[in-house]
Each structure stands twice: as structure tokens, then as C-alpha cells.
Image: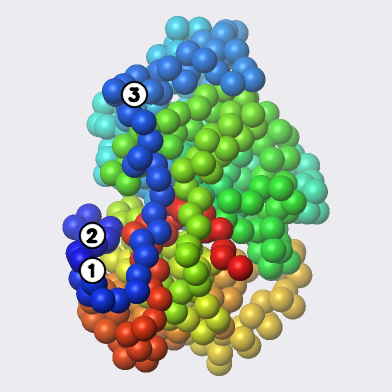
Amino acid sequence: MEIRLPFSTTGMTLQIDDDLDYEILESAIGSMPRSGKTEDEIVCEAMAHPIGSKRLMELAKGKQKVVIICSDHTRPVPSKHIIPFMLKEIREGNPKADITLLIATGFHRESTREELIHKFGEQIVDSEKIVVHDSRDREAMENIGVLPSGAPLFLNKIAVEADLLLSEGFIETHFFAGFSGGRKSVLPGVAGQETVLGNHCSAFIDSPYSRTGILENNPIHKDMVVASKMANQAYIVNVIIDEEKRIVHAVAGDAIEAHLAGCKFLEKYCQVKPKQLADIAISTNGGYPLDQNMYQSVKGMTAAEAVLKENGILIMVSNCGEGHGGEGFYEALKTCSSPAKLMEEIMKIPQEETKPDQWEYQIQARIMMKHRIIYVLCEKYQKMAQEMGFEVAKDVNEALAMALKEVGRKAHIAVIPDGVSIMVKRPK
């Protein structure tokens, strides 16, 4: 059996013998009934029937400063099929509106011009006002209150001063916020460093409710919703994409109601129920752009974590062509004496002293405490991965051979072609 796995922009083929006990866990998005509509038509139909809101052209009337929060280069949001229609409706409602596209980098690096062109197309990059958010630029932030967690809410002044605050994005499962999209455009999207760190504190990440597909009782989600309301995030256009990064569904309207409707729709297709817990799990981060670094690849590992037996072997297939993706993430794993000791130190850190990248290496340490991890990544960064405590393999087939040598050929294997697209319902 040959199974094609996403890996960078090229992919990688897993060859698995038919006599092995394996199952493939993947989203059912590809099995959705196809309407025959184009991606543009799907978005326009959603915007024509907004959830819990007036149409965007009505909201734009009389609004001078209009800000659209847009996703950055780390998210495969098909903005070319969203932003032109948002701009069109805004200008239909108010031809004189002063529109800014505010790039929600959260805690990521700045998006380059080339990456923005890839997202929006050259015409929009050249003709529209675009500002890239920098969470570390305190002068660009304004404190507008306190969140339920106790953290101050610092937001980009451009968003705060908007007469009409909008956002675009996509909804997928998220490994600690439950789902991406909606309110995440505000927090962490255009929030200040202090706010992001407070929201991602060790106690919140440690919560059993801060997991994939969970919104109820999720303390991280709760902070994000309040931030959205305090910022007056009025309207969103969020899409759901398939494995080819094509739009298959869209929601538009009220930032909270429309997002929740999108999450409920996605949940029907992304939840998987394994036959049993696995001895070996093979996962990916969905290919480019989500598998650009090890920091982002923790997401795909959490899907494997959810299906593995205690002490099971996790094979992570992620190109990581940009390396570790976070200096704090790299240093914490490289210098710790053990994942368990690192976790012990993290849990002592109070909210107001949360460190950059702490949440990512906290989740990584949690997984490493329970599982042997074999990384399949680009050759350039294999040594670095070893320094961080991972085993490495040149390709997925070598990694599987390494795992089978330890657990034997009677092992149950879970193959997860896209670890960021599914929500695992763990078997009992």
C-alpha cells in the first residue's frame, strides 16, 4: 500500500506492507457533497447570507476607518478568494472608506512582500494599505482593559482606532484553542506580547479543556472571545479548506456566531474514531506552509499523541525548512536535562512571567514525556533536531522500519496524513 503524505510542496510516499495492522485516520472534508460552486461563489454566497449580522456593505455605511485583520504567511488562508470581495462590499457601502489590511502575525515573524503577494496577489499588495503587526512594538499597542485571566489586553492601535473592525481567516482544529479562526484574529493575531504570553500561560495550556476541538470550559478560548468583544470585532469571513487548500465552505457575519457555526460544521467532518490505541502513529503538519518549522509542527504531533498508547512511537513527517521556528522553543529543548524536568520548571512559572514560545515547548515536553519521537525532516536541520532530543530518519519508510524493529510487526499503526485537520475521539 502506498500512502501519499503532505511534506513541504512535494509530498512523501509511505510504503506500508499489507500484512501490517494499520488504519488511516483522515478528515472527511474530501467526501463533502460538492455543490459545483467555485471558491469565489462559496465565499460570495456566505457574505450574501451573513450569520447574526447585517451585510458588510450595510455595516460599512458611515464608517471611515475600516480595518480588515488578515492572516499571515503561516496560515494557508486562500485570501485571494476572500479579500477582493470584502473590499468590494465595503466600497459599495462607503466608497470613501479608509481601509487598512492589518496582518495578524501574532507572535510570528514579519511577513515578507513575496509572502504577501503569494497570499493576496500583486495588485492588492501594490494598491491597498497594508500594515504588518509586530507584537513586540509596545509603541504600536494600546491597553484597552483586563481579560478574565487577569492579563492586560494590549492591541494594535490600528485595530483599536477602527470604526469598523473585520477579519478574514480559516477554521481548522487547533491544538489548544479548540479551533482556529474568528476571535483568534484579535488574540493572538493583533495583540501585544504581554497579552499573548498571559493568554498562553502554563496553567491554561495544562488545562484538560485546552485541547483540539474543545471550546466549552477552555480558558484560552474564553480569553479570546472576551478580547474579540472588547475590540469590537464586528464581522468575519472564515473559510474551511480541503486537503488541496481549496475552499469547500464559508461562513460570514458576527465574529462569535459565524465562527461557532463554522466550527460546528467542521466538527462533523474532522472528527475521527480510531479502532484502537496505536503502538505507532505517523503524522504530518499538512505540508506547506504549515510544516515550515518545528515550532508549528507540534500541532500535528498532538493528533498522534491522542491516538497513541503510553510509550507508543510517534513518527512526525514535517519538512521544517526554516528550522526550529522559535529561539526560546529551541533553547528550552536543547538545554533541558529531560522533558519531565523541563515540564516541572514550566509549571512553576506564574502567568505574568510567561516566556516566549513557552506554550509550544510545554506541549512538546508533554508529548516527549510519554512517547519516543522519530522526526522526518529536511536534511539541513536533522542535527539540530537531534540536539533537541529527537531521533531522526531520512524518510518516513526508514522511520517506520526503526519503529517496527522496536515494537514488532504485530503493532497497530495509525497513519494520519494531515495531523492539523482532524479531531481524534480517543478510544477507551
Which x, y percent locates residue 347? 71, 76
Image position of 219 with respect to 100: above or below: below
Q: Which residue is mark 3?
A: 35
* CA–CA distance in space, label 3 to label 1: 32 Å
For marks 3 and 2 on the same chain, the one whose residue lies earlier in the sequence: 2
Left-right relation of 301 to 284? right
Labelled pair 3, 1 in contact (Cβ < 8 Å) = no
Most extreme residue toward the front is 19
Which x, y percent locates residue 161? 63, 28
Q: Quadrant of the C terminus?
A: bottom right
- Return the residue nearer the eye: 366 or 61: 366
* CA–CA distance in space, label 1 to label 2: 6 Å
Left-right relation of 18 to 44? left
Q: Quadrant of the N terminus?
A: bottom left
Labelled pair 1, 2 in contact (Cβ < 8 Å) = yes
In the structure shown, which secondary structural element does the residue marked by tag 1 occupy?
strand
For residue 318, which quarter of the picture?
Answer: bottom left
Which x, y percent locates residue 332? 53, 79
Task: Tell me the amino acid under the disc marked 2.
Answer: Arg
10 Å crowding of disc 3: few (<14), some (14-19), many (20+)? few
Q: Which residue is mark 2?
A: 4
